[in-house]
Image (tube, rainbow, N blue to C red):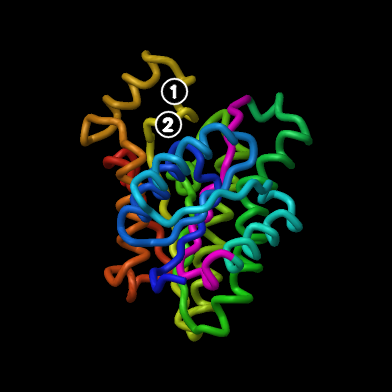
Amino acid sequence: MNNKKTALITGSSRGIGRAIAILFARNNYNVVINYNKSEEKAKELYDELTNEGLDVRIFKADVSKPEEANALVNYTIGQFENIDVLVNNAGISKPCMFTDMTYEQWNETMSVNLNSVFYVTKKALQYMLPNCSGKIINISSMWGLVGAAIEVDYSASKAAIIGLTKALAKELGPSNINVNAIAPGVINTDMVKGLGEETMSMLKEETPLMKIGQPEDIARCALFLAGEGGDFITGQVISSNGGFVI
């Protein structure tokens, strides 16, 4: 067993989660890549990183289900004996008008985006608390700060993550466990590519830095919070959004 720190990253086969997994693995972390439906992407990432000689594992789990979230955490412990960093990244977005939103869509969004954070974190704390050590990083969104039209369910779930982050940071602080959130702006992932070139161009123009963010921008923020630079930071929301929300 190596002496490196271990990072568990939910929803890490694509997009922001993938970038976080790559950056952590290349910065001397053991990494567990979690996926649910994107098995091919997860295996591609696993092969890429293992071919570099890095210590990574992959595990299929629908983290919106408590029993599968528990299995993911147990697998991580079985492979690496500890969880030093938990990044709750799994999320979905299905934009539609609030009046057209079904009960099923609302519940699915809350289950994947919010309940998963509760399930995975609760299980991970069984191992973090006895060690009085750990970093929990929750991926929210700038829409959790200010809300987005036609994304009421998504905005509500991401706002709830911010509330959870702040409250849990107060609760876990005495145990030397840091809890922070990252609230990305418009990031170049599959989630936003469906918006179309015209919308993306408009979003770029509305961003003071005049560019769309990249998944690596969020990954670098997560790596900072996980490292020594984040040791005295807890209960905070870092919104890496190019100035879109100030």
Q: Residues within 10 Å of mark 1 (few under 14, many from 20)?
A: few
Extent of the magenta region: 79-96
Judging depth in this view, the residue of 114 and 62 nearest the camera is 62
Q: In the image, what residue occupies the spot 37% across and 13% down?
A: 198
Residue type pointed to by label 2: Thr
Rendered location of residue 229, percent (x, y): 27, 69
Q: Is residue 158 visible?
A: no
| Closer-to-camera residue (223/168) | 223
What residue is shown with label 2? 189
The residue located at (38%, 40%) in the rendering is 185
Residue at image position (64%, 46%) is 60
What percent of the width, then of the height, locates residue 20?
A: 40, 49
SS at circle 1: helix
Q: Nearer the viewer, residue 245 or 15?
A: 15
The extreme left residue here reads: 209
**Which image quarter: residue 153?**
top right
Element marked by disc 2:
loop
Mark 2 vs 1: CB contact within 8 A: yes
Residue 242 location (% of width, % of height): 27, 40
Q: Is residue 82 magenta?
A: yes
Q: Is residue 66 left or right of residue 243?
A: right
Residue 55 figure quarter: bottom left
- In space, the residues marked 2 and 1 are separated at their CA atoms by 6 Å
- 209 relative to 167, above or below: above
195 is within the stretch colored magenta: no
* Residue on which the image places disc 1: 193
Q: Position of residue 180 (x, y in %)?
A: 44, 63
Q: Is residue 60 visible?
A: yes
Q: Indicate the amino acid at tag 1.
A: Lys
